[in-house]
Amino acid sequence: MTWVNAVIQGLLLGGQYALIACGLSLTFGVMRIVNLAHGDLAVCGAYLGLVLSTALGVPVWVTLPLLLPAAFCAGLLLQALLFGRALRHGVLAPVLVTFGLSVMIENLLQVAATSDPRGLNGGTLALASFRLGSITVSWLFMTAFLTACAVLSCVQLLLSRTSWGRKVRATADDLDTARLVGIRVRPLFAVVSGIAVATAALAGVFIGTIGTFDPLAGSNTLIFAFEAVVIGGLGSLWGTLIGGMALGVTQVVVGQVNEAYAVLAVHLLFLTVLAVRPGGLFASHQVASEVRGSGALG
Amino acid sequence: MRLLEVAGLDVFYGDFQALFGVSLAVPAGGATALVGANGAGKTTLLRTIAGVQPAGSGTIRYAGDDITAAPPHRRISRGIALVPEGRRLFPSLTVEENILVGAAAAASADWPLDRIYGVFPMIARRRRQRASTLSGGEQQAVAIARALAAAPALLLLDEISLGLAPRIVGELYQTLGALRETGATLVIVEQDLKRAMDACDDLVCLLEGRVALAAPVAAVTRDEVIAAYFGEGARGGSAGSSPKAAT
């Protein structure tokens, strides 16, 4: 029963990884930006949640109707003012720009909020749990997991079923031809970036409620998100969900044997997938061939 | 009436100049063949007219308005659509999705899906398939269908016969003939000189980024065009001037 428990807890943990990775997968899949500040943007979301819930004196969930639109707008602005400009200067520029953004965010947060670890007020949900046979499941973990599944499914449906999503996929396939057929790429990218930052902020709120966070937590978050994206397959959102769960299950199951090796096992899984299938397990055909062609990530 | 007028167009790729003072006029309702050797600037000219390649200097007028600085989506919604060289379909999208994306900035709703499938019955059967799984001829048909979805008044076609069997090319040109009857104006880049001259009313020959010959097809011989093609003749002027190619 210990093992079943480990797998279940691992799946739930993986949901959190998938939620943070969702935006990373989206921005990479569509715009070919590896956003190195993605984890820091999630941490910003957590701090915003902290400020709002403290100011209003309510659990952080209540502040989401304010927090998510704010994060969406921040994403729009980042794309319009920063990432969009960087994209026009080749593939390296966005990497440098997002790296710079990451350093700036971490230092500004340290100045503004000090390095003390913080936690978010999750209300009664944070402490509640239910029993599944002999296994105890935290409602908070369950909520994070279900939210991740819902968010990834919604984004995937948005991409596969709507005319907006069709334009996004066309642009992801071939930017130049997308412009040629009359797609307005800049507003499209801005909305994609808005969605990515909003999902990052949501993930940040869960991270801050489940554990603690500090100004430097973003980099560590980014690594797990990045690994989930790569394991699942670049440019595939379902893959990202599976990738996150693979990470979570590996971490908890190995942790069951020896806690010291849990995180190492996750990184080894990532390395193995990268060595055996550089395109990831569920890579979209397009991106997989790009990866094979350039060898940039191999 | 002239639908499209290009005057003194210079186009650059960085320091490299691809077009030098290109001028031409395309009458409404006609078909113009754009010929020339590889690297003569045919694709660059079409891409500049479509708005995806910026003009260095010169003007592009469409239906009387200066559109030199207009972005591609605005040109499409005014009725200019380009079928790009190499087809450039969106590989992960289905046939139908490719066509629907082409309607993103459509000039009008004159070309709904069923009308497009009526013109290209061979792709109607494949509408749910990914575009990348189709044969070359089918892919070319989808590329034209995608441009048609924008309901163009001016359709620019770049090397649609590239890599296709002659029978398939024949069928595509028959379709183009049917499109002309609907009132669309065509500009066709074509390597096969005979086919280009058979299908079009006017002919413009580019040589190293300049107009070498511009004349009604009926007013030039094949030899005169070939001379302009390889730069063995005197240079013709802008559109409408009579050819002065030496024989």
Image: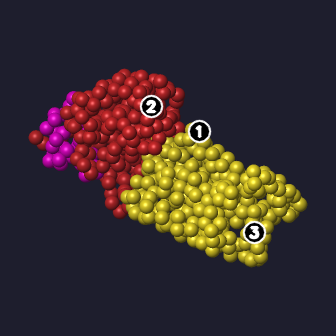
Chain colours: A yellow, B red
- A290 vs A268, left or right, is left
Residue occupied by mark 2: B127
Q: Mark 2 vs mark 1: same chain?
A: no
Amino acid under disc 2: Arg
Q: Measure the alpha-carbon separation of dots 2 and 3.
A: 51 Å
Say which chain tag 2 marks.
B
Q: Secondary structure at mark 2?
A: loop
- As rendered, which of B85 and A202 lies closer to the eye? A202
Q: Residue furthest right?
A: A57
Q: Nearer the viewer, residue A148 or A77?
A: A148
| Image position of A267 (left or right of A41) | left
Q: Residue at x 34, y 44 (%)?
A: B86
Residues tagged 2 and 1 counted as in contact (Cβ below 8 A):
no
Return the disc, 3 or 1, that comes first in the chain's sequence: 1
Chain of the residue displaying label 3: A
The amino acid sitting under disc 3 is Thr
**Which mark's residue is nearer the viewer, 2 or 3?**
3
Asked if badge 2 and badge 3 are on a common chain, one would say no
Q: Is residue B142 magenta?
A: no
How far across and how far down the image is residue B218, in percent? 21, 29
Q: Position of residue B235 (x, y in %)?
A: 21, 46
Q: Nearer the viewer, residue A155 or B223?
A: A155
* Percent of width and height locating residue B151: 47, 31
Labels 3 and 1 positioned on one and the same chain:
yes
Q: CA distance from mark 2 to mark 1?
A: 17 Å
Residue identified by numbered label 1 = A162
Residue type of the residue flagged with mark 1: Thr
Identify the residue position indicated by label 3 in the image: A212
